Amino acid sequence: MHIVFEKRNSVSRKAILLVPTVSFLVSLILTGILLIIFKTNPFTTYSSMFIGAFGSWTNFTETLVKAIPLMLTGVGVGLAFKLRFWNIGAEGQLVFGGVAATWVALFWSPFLPSWLVLPTALVMGSLAGGLWAGIPAVLKVGLKVDETLVSLMLNYVAILLAQGLYYGAWIDPKGMGFPGTKLFPKAAWLPRFSGRAHIGLFIALILGVIMWLVLNRTRWGFEIKMVGQNPRAARVMGVKIGKSIITAILISGAFSGLAGSFEVTAISHRLQQGLSLGYGYTAIIVAWMAQLNPIASLFVAVLMAGLLVGGDQVQMMMGLPSAMGIVLEGMILFPMLAGSLFTDYRLKFITKSRSREAAV
Amino acid sequence: MKNDQKEKTPILEMRGITKRFPGVLANDNVDLELFPGEVLALLGENGAGKSTLMNVLAGLYRADSGTIRMKGEEIEIYSPKDAMKHGIGMIHQNFKLVQTMTVAENVILGLENEDFILDLKKVGNKIKDISSHYNLKVDPNAVIWQMSVGEQQRVEILKLIYRGAEVLILDEPTAVLTPQESRELNQIIKQMTGEGKSAIFITHKMDEVMEFSDWVRVLQKGKLVSVVRTKDTSPRELSKMMVGREVLFRVEKKPAQPGETVLKLENVTALNEKGIKALQNISLNLRRGEILGIAGVAGNGQRELTEVITGLHKVTEGKILVEDKDMTNKDPLEFINEGVSHIPSDRVAMGIVGDMSVAHNLAMKEYRKAPLTEYGILHPKRILAMAKKMITFFQIATPTPYTNVKFLSGGNIQKTILAREIGACASLLVAAYPARGLDVGATESVRKEMISERDNGKGVLLVSEDLDELMSVSDRIAVMNEGRIMGIVPADKADIESLGLMMAGVPQEELT
Amino acid sequence: MIALITSILAITLRAGTSLIYATIGEIYTERSGILNLGLEGMMLLGAVSAFATVYYTGSLLLALLVAALTGMILSALHAFLSITMRANQVVSGLSITLFGSGFASFLGQRLGPASNGHYLIGLVGKKFTPFDIPGLSKIPVLGAVFSQDILTYIVFLIIPVAWFYMYKTKNGLNLRAVGESPQTADAMGINIAKTRYIYTILGGTLVALGGAHLSLSYAPGWTDNITGGRGWIVIALVIFSMWNPSRAIWGALLFGGINAIQFRLQATGTTISAPLLNMLPYLVTIIVLVLMTWVETLNKKVGAPAALAVPYMRGEK
């Protein structure tokens, strides 16, 4: 007997929901085994992670704080991935967006009416994120340069650029050498509604839903799907591929740029070390686990944020490395990738029945 | 007596071969016998299961049941390597050659008994021996992508001989050749069978069966329907066996009533991806109410021709006019807006988006405009209504309009494209190989649609490699060779011989 | 001045060594048609596992073996996902990198001795030290080439061997065919899955050794993100070398050279700010990529294996 994969006659709806759920469970089990190897009880670890992330309203607001950038970057990355444009530069787009928002908050605010400071900062941050993503997009469309590498390299460039600014030109003169800009004027602070959780949450949720509508109910979204699934056919059908890719990637980057603007205007109120905690990379996990569906990304973002917050909690409570949460997240995609085969294929078991037996 | 015995023992036997694909019974209990020194023609329509059966023999597919015997002994073929070990080699329709490698490298690819450190000079000498013996002109150091299709086929044959194949399987070998080249191929096969090798060749062309083979086996919908000696049958009888009924060799159509010019090419030259001239100084004229057929061996510029008149390929010199409007190097969208429709040659890669629904695929031309879109917002209900109408009218067999189009059969995919393109066509329909790979029913309906579009006053440009199709469907036939038009003849005055000569590069003026 | 050039050359080679290991590894993987973007993760885990091993056992050889094993396991995972499960290779590689960097930093905070709060950071272990090749190391300037550690000497042996194997042997021919046209290779009796598994795992092994060179020689010890994006730069270097092992050295020397110049400039106390200087390798990578792609377009020639990152299933187009 041997096993072969056989193409299904239609996409399995069940597998679409089942695969991510099972993947999450498998990741818990694998990481649990790892924990046992390191002589730690996985059940107490997971329960304290869960309590740390969702156990109380205060803890949950912290989870939301981390979920907001993950929602935005997740939706943005998902849009790019829909086009098979492997934008792994969300991290850099987020940071560059944060830098631009900082620029507005610090240097434009004297010239703007105070009600306009915050919106301008957010818009400029989004634009900057889009621009940063636009570099690999234009290089890809114009010269066919591999977008994966360019977008990734630009992460390092953006982070070093931000560093150069808060260590150098923009350093707070009264900060006693502490690397960071001075505090933003109040007009550039994004309001919080509970703990550190800020109204960016609602903006992110609304944008996620809008993205879903745009993808499924507009001409532009229709073209994005065509280009993503079969660019050659899309071209035959008269779609301008380059234009589609560039607009979509600008928007993808803008989502990350907005996330970065939220981080500086709502959380740190200045540009400093640790602007991004790898959100741009976690966004890849969010987008893929949500199977590039923007609304699903919103929920997955909360789950992933929970793992990050829970990871910090177990560090404080059990002395486990905070990278714990990242290890858990990193494991999720493996079963997810292995499982996605089952949406298109099913297993078929073949026994070696030759004709003689069959003929009888 | 001993000799007589030898004559009657088949070198290869297949018994009760059954192979299922999801939803399709490709081979149903098929038997096959092949005698040494003989050529067996495997005849059948597209989709009759000929290639599947041969892929089982070549080790690419594994049969669900059945036995294979070679020289009387039962053998198991699990992979191409096993097939090769037993002396069975196959030349596939899409050649199995690594384009970036040389002939010599391709010939020894995957061979286990070659030296670990390659000695390409030794291989080259051996290749030269074989090629002079069989009169197969091939340079062992040439790189594949620089060779013509005919040369590449010679490399495929050489490869099998080098590997000591005793049974050669050829899958529609003449589809890529001019009639004259086909005859050369026949000579080579004759020489090989004369030396005791045997061959199976897959075809759906009657005249080739008569010319090449000793035996014919006819497959129909996966089943073996008849076995005859070639000398005891006739093309007419064969085609009856193949289709299960009498086939009309001519399509019913009224005489053409050409109107005003819809497409005009003036001295068009275009380069292919490698920078070589794919179209050279092409001029032609197509009028409304007329079908212009384009004949030629694949790869002689037909693809580029269909692409320059749909905006997919850039022109370096010359002019393209659609309804007297200069459309040279305009975007595909502008051609679409002029009412130019396109049925592309590679329908799955260029004609549909497999992961989108049938309804959405049907809307892929009209989605831009009202009523399907208003202010950039789609109207799903209107899209669905339009799709349902098309599905009924063109008899597209799909479980639901929401089914992803990739799950449909080849014929229904083509009908989906046809429905969309005809729906959007206002002036010119460009159809590249529209009936390729379809069964008889679907082929007939595709051809009828071409003619009805013509009768509706549209210009139709039909590219095909099937001369019968061209002669029965089109009104005029232009023959292409190496990117040039060798001549244009009225379809009712065309004969295969002169079309073949033009396909081989003889200009019309030089034909006597 | 000569002393300066000599020292830059010496540092260049030292910095370039890990890049050459990884570049040759990835060239072999990609030649079989598998794109592995998990390099960064594999180098990090190679580095941390090698350092932890050498810290506890004092055996450099064992450290290399452990790193190699780490690379094998991770690349086998990638091979399983991309070959057997036909997963998207870009995402599978990204997952390896995401998991690898997370797990490496987890291990860095967990594998250390209790006295150091279980941290590996800040510990000192045995390391590979340069030694002179008698006679040759005395040659002016070029002598720097002959004053390296054993891993560098080995990599200079690997380059010609890797080239010869790929272009002059039967196995190399089959490997190239699998990456270029798996349909052809399959019909010619080559086992596609087996070939791809072998070279993905072989490639992963070399990549992890490249990571080990970082923690055992170039920057002995463990720090989070010790690779600093080298895994990604290597993917660009594969393109730069046009998938030819003999050219792997040039890219590695270019980037090793940038490292060396940064090193020198920072040592001399330049006015150029450190972050700007640190951007250099990443900006150069982008420029190199753009130039290479441009040259390919001009020559109408694609260097990448035609079937790179395309899963193969018999009977499907």
Image: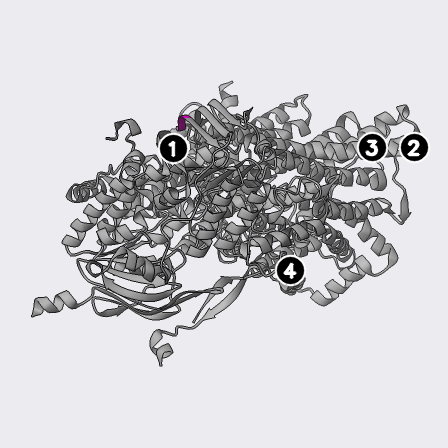
Instruction: Give the structural element (helix, strand or loop) at label 3.
Output: helix
> What residue is drawn where x is 17% and y is 58%?
B37
Q: Tell me the number on the disc at residue A115.
A: 2
Three-letter amino acid code at the position of disc 2 = Trp
Instruction: Give the structural element (helix, strand or loop) at label 1.
Output: loop
Q: Which residue is mark 3?
A: A121
Residue A31 drawn at (x, y percent): 65, 61
The residue stretch that appears in magenta: B278-282
Q: Is residue B389 left or right of residue B472?
A: right
Residue A73 drawn at (x, y percent): 72, 44
Q: Which residue is mark 1?
A: C134
Q: Earlier in the sequence, mark 3 or mark 2?
A: 2
- At label 4, counting other C-alpha atoms closer than 10 Å, the crowd grade (few under 14, some 14-19, many 20 or more) is some
- At label 2, counting other C-alpha atoms closer than 10 Å, the crowd grade (few under 14, some 14-19, many 20 or more) is few
Is any atom of residue C108 visible in this view?
no
Residue A344 sits in quarter: bottom right
> What residue is drawn where x is 22% and y is 47%?
B186
Check if mark 3 and mark 2 are on a common chain: yes
> What residue is drawn where x is 50% and y is 22%?
C5
Q: Is residue B326 left or right of residue A28?
A: left
Check if mark 4 and mark 2 are on a common chain: yes
Q: Which residue is mark 4?
A: A16
Q: Is residue C52 left or right of residue B371?
A: left
Q: Which is in the foreground here, disc 3 or disc 1?
A: 3
Between B184 and C256, the residue placed more toward the observer is: B184
